[in-house]
Amino acid sequence: MFLRKLCRGSGALNIRTYSVGVIDKRPPKILITGGLGQLGVECAKYLRGKYGRENVILSDIIKPTTEVANDGPYIFADILDFKGLQKIVVDHRVDWLIHFSALLSAIGEQNVPLAVRVNIEGMHNVIELAKQYRLRIFVPSTIGAFGPDSPRNPTPNITVQRPRTIYGVSKVHAELLGEYYHYRFGLDFRCLRFPGVISSDPPGGGTTDYAIAIFHDVLRKGRYQCYLKPDTRLPMMHVRDALRALSEFLEVPNEKLNRRVYNVTSMSFTPEELAEKINQHLKEFQITYQPDSRQDIADSWPQVFDDSEARRDWQWNPEVDLDNLVSLMIKEVKEKIAANGY
């Protein structure tokens, strides 16, 4: 569509490369799209700690809170506006692009046309942008990229996928498109398939977000009604491990990567097992179960993620186990509730 007219670059652009410590000693300039979603704000804080406050630009189409605006550079960026994205990359001398913009699984099923635009058309824009300006591009994928025909326990790095949500379909599309651009054009495309990522931020519409919602509801109301069955096993990781995996993966030299897409995980548990761990800290709370449409999604996803290739190729190793996760979440969600006064 409009990409045909806007995506032609000069030959001079195509020979420009960046590698920290090789061509240029300055830190990378990083643009994060969809920055006000589940991972964006925390990712910006993490990377600003490594590369400097002014070198990590958070972006979205939403007005940021005062806290976000004060924490570092924030700009408006619409991933469906290719020309606007070009201007940002040129004006800010962007080197690395972290593309978080996406509608998550449950939300995507409620609005498939919007999910197609955001998750698929938006991906077309950023991948072509990265090719034109020789950016290193990171795009997260998900356990949702697998489907009911995939082996579930464990799910290896390379296997049949066939997801049955538009979110999953769009992520398989992103994986394959990124790999194609890498092998066809030499694009430095990198992708991690994350499990459910658990942080203190309120849930954002993902199927695995029960593992976030339970802490908010238990600490605020003393009870939680779970939309999954008690024995539904899914792979998970705390946001601290997710950000560390992302950061370490971005810095791995290309020659060490045998793949462009890797599974990463920390643990697997069920709602019942999580509730039992929470009960060791908070004695009096109630959990009930009323499965809804998200149960069908969860039943098609991996139960245990095999991330042995990431451990082998770039020494990925998680640090937060289930016991640590529960302790961290109780502490962090209490602080979030106190700070927001609800």
Image: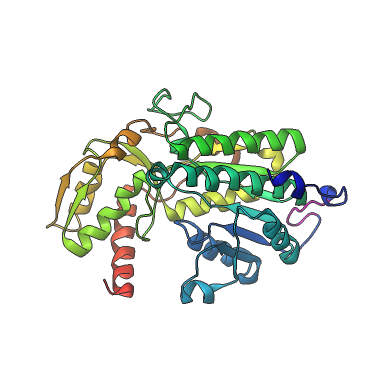
> Residue 121 versus residue 72: which sits nearer the camera?
121
Residue most extreme to the right: 12
Residue 315 visible within the image: no
Rendered position, 201 above or below 52: above
> Residue 223 versus residue 132: which sits nearer the camera?
132
Q: Quadrant of the N terminus?
A: top right
Rendered image coloring scheme: rainbow
Could you say which quadrant of the image residue 220 lies in?
bottom left
Residue 289 placement (x, y as % from top left): 18, 43
Q: Residue at x 19, y 47 (%)?
A: 276
Q: Is residue 65 left or right of residue 334?
A: right
Rendered position, 140 above or below 173: below
Rendered position, 169 above or below 189: above
Could you say which quadrant of the image residue 255 lies in?
top right
Q: Quadrant of the C terminus?
A: bottom left
Residue 325 placement (x, y as % from top left): 34, 53
Confirm whether the magenta stretch covers residue 284: no
Could you say which quadrant of the image residue 111 lies in?
top left
Residue 82 visible within the image: yes
- Magenta span of residues: 16-22
Q: Is residue 131 left or right of residue 332?
A: right
Q: Is residue 90 left or right of residue 167?
A: right
Q: Residue at x 49, y 63 (%)?
A: 41
Instruction: State the predominant SS element of the stretch in magenta.
Output: loop
Confirm whether the magenta stretch covers residue 20: yes
Q: Residue at x 31, y 40 (%)?
A: 294
Residue 263 placement (x, y as % from top left): 50, 37
Residue 13 placement (x, y as % from top left): 83, 52
Rendered position, 20 above or below 119: below
Q: Report how many numbered discs are placed on residues in the image.
A: 0
